Amino acid sequence: QVQLVESGGGLVQPGGSLSLSCAASGSISNFYAMCWYRQAPGKQREWVATVTSGGATGYKDSVKGRFTISRDNAKNTVSLQMDSLKPEDTAVYYCGARTRITGPPDYWGQGTQVTVSS
């Protein structure tokens, strides 16, 4: 069992930046992939970005070029740098840990709110 705790959310103006962090209670090296998802009000949770144990990354099309996911195995943390934020990026952002090659995460954090508004 691992616990994931997100931090770094908040209110930012359009065009601004935020950096989210996810701290794991155990070694993230045990997981095939670490992911970020988000859920906007009235919408389903959607995948945002993934970084595998090998360092490969993947992004939702709408965030490519604006968001960067990274992992620090020594500190057991995963980060999501978000630049050029848009109002449509407003959502609760969740960190996830996945043991399998595909499928949803096996473990979830509690989420952190990101609001992009002027």
Image (spheres, grey):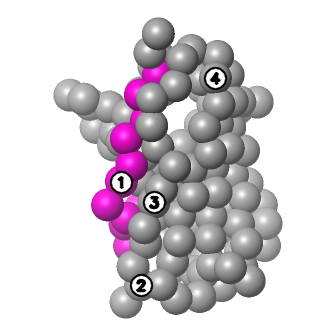
Left or right of residue 80: residue 40: left
Residues shaded magenta:
104-116
Left or right of residue 41: residue 37: right
Chain-order first, disc 4 or disc 2: 2
- Quadrant in the picture for residue 3: bottom left
108 is higher (above) or lower (below) than 16: below
The residue where tag 1 is placed is 111
Q: CA distance from mark 1 to mark 4?
A: 20 Å
The residue where tag 3 is placed is 6
Q: Mark 2 packing: few (<14 Cα in 10 Å), some, or many (20+)? A: few
Q: In the image, residue 84 lies at what x, y percent?
A: 67, 22
Look at the numbered discs 1 and 3 and tell me whether their residues touch, using CB distance below 8 Å: yes
Q: Mark 4 packing: few (<14 Cα in 10 Å), some, or many (20+)? A: some
What residue is shown at x 47% (from left), y 22% (from top)? 116
In the structure shown, which secondary structural element does the residue marked by tag 2 occupy? loop
What residue is shown at x 53% (from left), y 43% (from top)? 48
In the structure shown, which secondary structural element does the residue marked by tag 3 occupy? strand
Chain-order first, disc 4 or disc 3: 3
Q: Give the residue type at disc 2.
A: Val
What residue is shown at x 43% (from left), y 72% (from top)? 4
4 is higher (above) or lower (below) than 2: above
Q: CA distance from mark 2 to mark 1?
A: 15 Å
Q: Is residue 58 visible?
A: no
